[in-house]
Image (tube, rainbow, N blue to C red):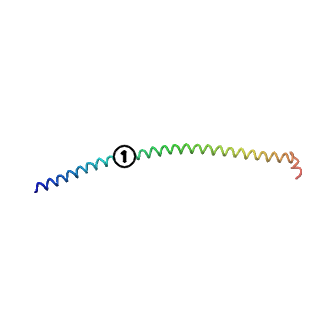
Amino acid sequence: MLVAEIERQLSFARRQAKKAETYKVVKAELGELEQLAAARRIIDQREELGLQTSRDAELKTALESARAGAATMRDQSRSRVIERAIGTCGIGRCAART
């Protein structure tokens, strides 16, 4: 009876040892998978940063172009106003009326 109890406990200890070994393997695999997932996130974020940087440069170029276009339009508008004023009054005639 004592031998049977010892064998039962030994069997239990072996099962526990096997479970512990399986746990170690699974935990190691999980650690590797977590590292791979983190590396993938870093790669994805770097790619996204590259895309955003390119988009930022495109938008800055478009803004500069729009500002230059607006300045040109403003200058043309001023020129037309001046031309109309000169055309209406003639050079020197409006000044003589005042």
- Which of 64 and 39 lies nearest the eye of the viewer? 39
Mark 1 lies on residue = 33
User: What quarter of the picture does the N terminus occupy?
Assistant: bottom left
- Which of 20 and 70 lies nearest the eye of the viewer? 20
- Residue 91 position within the rendered picture, expressed as x and y whole percent measured from the top left: 86, 45
- Residue 5 position within the rendered picture, expressed as x and y whole percent measured from the top left: 13, 56
Pointer 1: residues within 10 angstroms few (<14), some, or many (20+)?
Answer: few
Left/right of residue 97 with respect to residue 28 in the rendered view: right
Going 35% across and 45% down the picture, which residue do you hit?
32
- Residue 84 position within the rendered picture, expressed as x and y whole percent measured from the top left: 82, 47
Q: What's the residue type where badge 1 is placed?
A: Leu
- Residue 20 position within the rendered picture, expressed as x and y whole percent measured from the top left: 25, 51
Left/right of residue 90 with respect to residue 18 in the rendered view: right
Q: Secondary structure at mark 1?
A: helix
Going 39% across and 45% down the picture, which residue do you hit?
36
Going 75% across and 44% down the picture, which residue do you hit?
76
